Amino acid sequence: MKIGVQLWPQATTVKEMRTAWRAADAMGVDSLWTWDHFYPLSGDPEERHFECYTLLAAMAADTCHASVGALVTCFTYRNPQLLADMSRTIDHISDGRFVLGIGSGWFERDYTEYGYEFGDAVGRLKLLEAGLPVIKERMSKLNPQPVRGSIPLMIGGGGEKRTLRLVAEHADQYNYFGPPESYANKLRILDEWCAKVGRNPREIERTVAIYPKEVTPEIFAQYKEAGAEHIILASGGPFDLGLVEQLLAWR
């Protein structure tokens, strides 16, 4: 079982985040993440908040062990060709540890405040579907290429008709937030999509993000039984890595 931690870039400082991701990396976590939003998702909506990809560049430079990425990038916030180039550059900063986590987006305030068209969920998923081949094409043209030749692609979300099909067609990792029973059902449907598109389901790493209140030995065992291969603890500031230590010990 891999263990990761997502550090929320809200109600904190860059100094606190850097201290936390350096400490988590030294503890031996397998992955480090932040999120791709422009405003807090909980608590005071006007609290301090920092942008995702500039943080990821700093995270890549500050660490040496864990993979780094966004859980997950909102596709429509950036031109897909630019996103490919940004990802490749961070991959080089990290010496090949970058994961391109991506989703269709959902937080309406980000869109309205920053001037993006919000549309509807189906429309955003169609844009993501059209953009994934664009990202791959641009990535193939970049010089230099990513450190490992390609960058792992994670797709996050729970949509059973479109999102999980895109995972089966394109992704190296799949991430979901949800209880073990729901997660097991998503993985079952993902396996069905893999059969339909001719993909080996074992090629897709199964990750799940959990909240601090869910960190118990019982829940850990339930996610493992459901098929999780990589548990990511979502953590807001002030960052207490004690629960990360527990997860590392349980594995």
Image (tube, grey):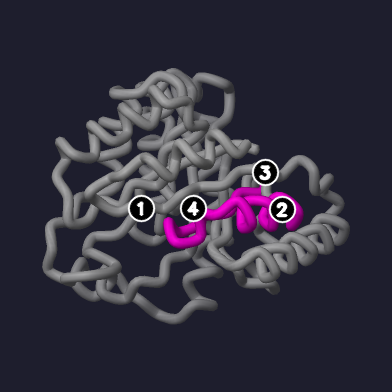
Q: Residues within 10 Å of mark 2 (few under 14, many from 20)?
A: some
Q: Is residue 123 left or right of residue 110?
A: right
Relative vertical location of residue 44 with respect to residue 237 in this rendering, above or below: below
Task: Name the kind of residue labelled 2 in the image.
Answer: Glu
Mark with earlier residue (2, 3): 2
Question: Which residue is under mark 4?
Answer: 102
Residue 188 position by quadrant: bottom right
Q: Give x and y (percent) for residue 76.
A: 39, 61
Q: Which mark is residue 169?
A: 2
Mark with earlier residue (3, 4): 4
Are circles 3 and 4 on residues that touch, CB within 8 Å?
A: no
**Residue 174 makes an appearance in the image:** no
Instruction: State which mark lies toward you, 2 or 1.
Output: 1
Label 2 – label 1 distance at C-alpha: 24 Å
Task: Name the kind of residue labelled 3 in the image.
Answer: Glu
Residue found 41% across the figure and 53% down from its top: 234
Instruction: Report the magenta residues as a range.
Output: 206-226
Q: Which mark is residue 35?
A: 1
Q: Residues within 10 Å of mark 3 (few under 14, many from 20)?
A: some
Task: Name the kind of residue labelled 4 in the image.
Answer: Ile
Q: Does the magenta segment cover residue 162? A: no
Question: Which residue is under mark 3?
Answer: 229
Are circles 2 and 1 on residues that touch, CB within 8 Å?
A: no
Label 3 – label 4 distance at C-alpha: 19 Å
Residue 74 position by quadrant: bottom left
Label 1 – label 3 distance at C-alpha: 21 Å
Label 1 – label 4 distance at C-alpha: 10 Å
Instruction: State which mark lies toward you, 2 or 3.
Output: 3
Q: Residues within 10 Å of mark 4 (few under 14, many from 20)?
A: many
Instruction: State which mark lies toward you, 1 or 3.
Output: 3
The answer to which of 200 and 215 lies nearer the viewer is 215
Q: Give x and y (percent) for residue 45.
A: 18, 71
